Image (spheres, helix red, strand yellow):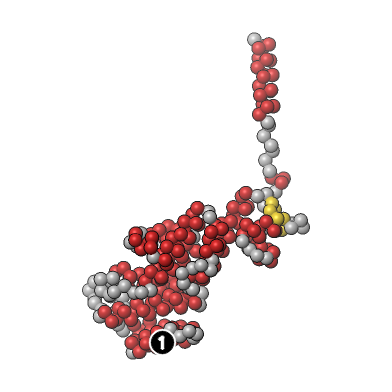
Amino acid sequence: MPYQLHKELKEEWQKPTKNLKKIGNLLDQLKLALTKLVFLPTGTVTASQNELLVARDTLEIGAEYSVAVKDVVAFERYMSQLKCYYYDYKNLIADSPNKYQLLGLNLLFLLSQNRVAEFHTELELLPADIIHSNKFIRTSVVLEQYFMEGCYNKIFQTKGNVPAESYNFFMDILLETVRDEIGSCLEQAYEKISLNEASKKLNLKTKEQVKGFGTKKGWTLGPDSFYHFANEALKPKEPIPSVELAEQAIIYAKELEMIV
């Protein structure tokens, strides 16, 4: 039964126009059927190579299906199980042709959630030559470098230039994460900023998009079409200029001499 379901799932997934509802139903049935096989073998229980291949293939389709239906929680769950096949069972079955595409996608997922520490933990599991040469892994690594260096404009430029269609989903989430970072910087760096200037900084094309972002951040748009971040009344008093301090010090010194 699992093998027949797996065949149906694979055929449906490979179609140019995918029936996502049918694929979701097949995945649910197949995951249940796989429990009758050795789904996640342990040290005391072995599985046939064929069982491992069917299970891994099912999880890979499940991970990509999760992206297609925009289910982040399901994607993380599928990847957690898939990593067992990629790392723990690597001596039992040959590498999947989809391995690095999905591991790179997982790295991008972690980056889009601003989970940088976990990003580096996952990266440490990969060989150095793969990190530098594999296009799927390299894309996520370069994006992380841009993110940490604050080169946000380069991240925006990467949009539309990803190695696989599935990467666009997490790229969109990453761009929102980047905008949140830029927004926080604007709040600290400016007392006020015009709607047009905010549009450029946030890489948003329309005023409506900027207003939507501002509403989400709790920004106040004044009648002058400026966002105001600082209350003038709360600004600290200007410090006494150094020249005035020097003159006062000289006066005090002369008065002390007169007293002596």
Pointer 1 residue: 11
**Closer to the camera, 150 or 36?**
150
- Position of 21 with respect to 235 (left or right) is left
**Closer to the camera, 59 or 154?**
154
Residue at the outermost top position: 260
Q: Residue at x 33, y 70 (%)?
A: 86
Name the secondary structure under disc 1.
Answer: helix
Q: Residue at x 61, y 59 (%)?
A: 202
Residue 121, position as x, y percentages in the image: 38, 59
The amino acid pointed to by label 1 is Glu
Q: Residue at x 62, y 49 (%)?
A: 189
Residue 257, position as x, y percentages in the image: 65, 12
Q: Residue at x 53, y 55 (%)?
A: 151
Residue 72, position as x, y percentages in the image: 48, 71
Q: Is residue 132 above or below residue 88?
A: above
Q: Badge 1: how crowded within 10 Å, few (<14), some, or many (20+)?
A: few
Give residue 214's quadrant in the image: bottom right
**Residue 169 shows up from this direction:** yes
Residue 75, position as x, y percentages in the image: 44, 72
